[in-house]
Image (cartoon, rainbow, N blue to C red):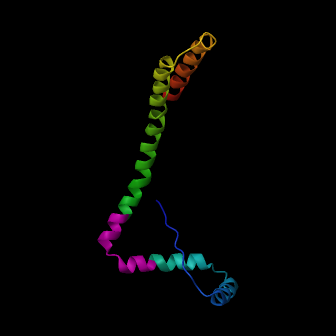
């Protein structure tokens, strides 16, 4: 679930007094505000809409996990192919030729280990 940070202004003197008395009761301002927002949400948003929103919130983490894993595996492979396709197109000097097979085998090995 993604979250959004709310930022609001409140007089400093009032905030200090509020903190002082909430500390005496061992309460946190942030938690009290969160509780208030939750209650306001339940009061203002119709039950059917809340159900819909909550079902979407439950589906989002599951779909993000399943989509993130294959995407992470698939992305490096095309990049390595492009690099290997571009490598022969570049002019090679006699000094580079002994290194070229080592680079190609390194790229192939990396591609295989990433796809497993």
Q: In the figure, 76 relative to 10: above or below?
A: above
Asked whether residue 84 is drawn in magenta, I would say no
Asked whether residue 50 is drawn in magenta, I would say yes
Q: In the figure, 109 relative to 60: above or below?
A: above
Determine whether, in the image, residue 51 is placed left or right of residue 90: left
Determine whether, in the image, residue 38 is placed left or right of residue 96: left
Q: Which of the two residues, 26 or 14, is positioned nearer the viewer here?
A: 14
Residue, x 46% and y 35% (percent of image)? 75
Residue 47 position, x and y percent, is 32, 73
Q: In the figure, 32 relative to 48: above or below?
A: below
Residue 70 falls in which quadrant of the image? top left
Residue, x 48% and y 23% (percent of image)? 86
Q: Which of the two residues, 109 or 44, is positioned nearer the viewer here?
A: 109
Residue 18 position, x and y percent, is 64, 87
Residue, x 56% and y 79% (percent of image)? 32
Residue 30 falls in which quadrant of the image? bottom right
Q: Which residues are magenta?
A: 39-53
Residue 44 position, x and y percent, is 36, 80
Residue 23 falls in which quadrant of the image? bottom right
Taken as a whole, is the magenta stretch helix, strand or loop? helix
Determine whether, in the image, residue 95 is placed left or right of residue 38: right
Q: In the figure, 107 relative to 26: above or below?
A: above
Determine whether, in the image, residue 11 is placed left or right of residue 5: right
Residue, x 43% and y 49% (percent of image)? 64
């Amino acid at each position: 679930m993604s979250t959004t940070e709310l930022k609001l202004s409140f007089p400093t003197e009032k905030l200090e007094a509020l903190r002082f008395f909430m500390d005496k009761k061992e309460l946190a301002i942030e938690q009290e505000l969160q509780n208030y927002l939750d209650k306001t949400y339940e009061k203002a948003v119709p039950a059917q809409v809340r159900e819909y929103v909550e079902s979407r919130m439950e589906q989002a983490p599951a779909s993000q996990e399943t989509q993130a894993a294959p995407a992470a595996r698939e992305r490096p492979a095309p990049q390595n192919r492009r690099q290997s396709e571009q490598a022969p197109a570049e002019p090679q000097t006699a000094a580079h030729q002994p290194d070229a097979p080592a680079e190609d085998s390194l790229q192939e090995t990396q591609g295989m280990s990433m796809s497993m």
